[in-house]
Image (spheres, rainbow, N blue to C red):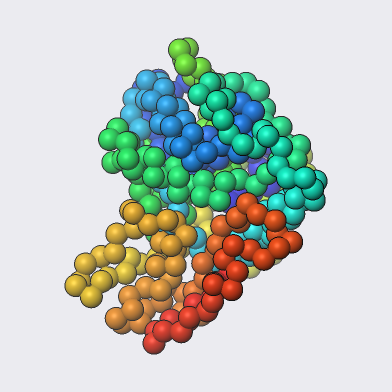
Amino acid sequence: MGITGLTATLQPYGVSGVFTDQHVVIDGPALAYTILSICRSNGIAQPSYDLLGRSVIQWLDVLVLQVKKIDAIYFDAYLPVGKRDVRMDRSAKLFIQLMQFCNNSPKGCDSKYLFGTAEDNLDLFTTKQPSTHKQLVPPSFLVPAIIDALDQCPRYCHLVSLVPGEADAFCAQHLAAHGGIVLTSDSDLLVHDLGQGKVVFFRDIHASATDTWKCLVYDSKKICERLGLKPSGGNICRFGYEVYRDPHASISQLVQNCSSPIPDEAEYNKFCQQYLQHELASLPVTAQGETVQLRNLDPRISELVLQLGNPIEGILVDSSSESRIFLPVLIENPLREGAPGNHVLPFDSSHTPYTGG
């Protein structure tokens, strides 16, 4: 979910490059939010799901002309329990953002939040930045809408994978095994072991409909060499840890800290584990002995399915806590009763408790 300050710290070490002859892996959730940003840069503050779907297909149609091949597009179907606090914090921030928007809009939404004819004139490669003034929360089903659009497109449906873990971890594993470039917005990928793989952030892509796309390419091994750190032995992980501890430290101070004794071994080991040992969920098995397919499930539903595990044997992915589903933040007045209301209730089963939350 990103290390605060890491991308900004390492930006001077990004190298200008192009996508020609490159194999590309895409971080699906990051792609979804990039498409939303493009819509908002066009003045469409709250795009329809139809527009989001059409836009992602059009964007990929141009990307495939720039690269050798798109190998895969990974989406989360399960996030580690260890990230639950981070997710709760993000949900709280979205709720606060929605509340502020409603407070600043006592007479209802401005007309710009009602999509219309402007949707037919979308510039996918605009250099304008989306306005952050009175910004509404992202569409409640942004990521599922992107997945649905890709699933319905014969050109890209075979590339989509809902994975029983974090998308960035699967992107990292793919690059470690096969090389290539990952397109993402997640700075965590700079700390993973990518083998010969490299990282490109969506925000650093300079795209157009006709010209060769340019970008900044981050090669963790070469960055380590330039910083005077050994590219092996977990040094990039140590560097990421030092940025995590002090996001505002200078490069020289961070490098110096990397050569000093680790101040908190337990904290450091916990930090590294998320990049060295990826938490995955086992795919449940149906009563007929078939593995449950995640492909057609909303990621939130798939996460609950993976937590519940196999109801026949009563297996839980995380047996130490209750299973949870993170409901989307709906676009409604948070000062009133929400649309789910009292219809979202805990249920009791012979195997697994469930708490909506």
Q: Residue drawn at (25%, 71%), measured in percent from left and top? A: 286
221 or 322: which is nearer to us? 322
Image position, residue 352 (x, y; %): 43, 81
Image position, residue 58 (x, y; %): 42, 27
Q: In this rendering, would 135 be left or right of 46?
A: right
Image position, residue 238 (x, y; %): 61, 51
Q: In this rendering, would 115 be left or right of 109?
A: left
**In this view, 340 is above or below 133:** below
**In this view, 143 is above or below 350:** above
Which residue is the extreme one toward the left?
Answer: 288
**In this view, 316 is above or below 266:** below
* Residue 231 can be seen, yes or no: no
Q: Residue drawn at (55%, 62%), measured in percent from left and top? A: 327
Which residue is the extreme one toward the top?
Answer: 211
50 or 144: which is nearer to us? 50
- Residue 297: image quadrant is bottom left
Quarter containing the C terminus: bottom right
* Residue 7 can be seen, yes or no: yes
Image position, residue 301 (x, y; %): 43, 62
- Residue 44: image quadrant is top right
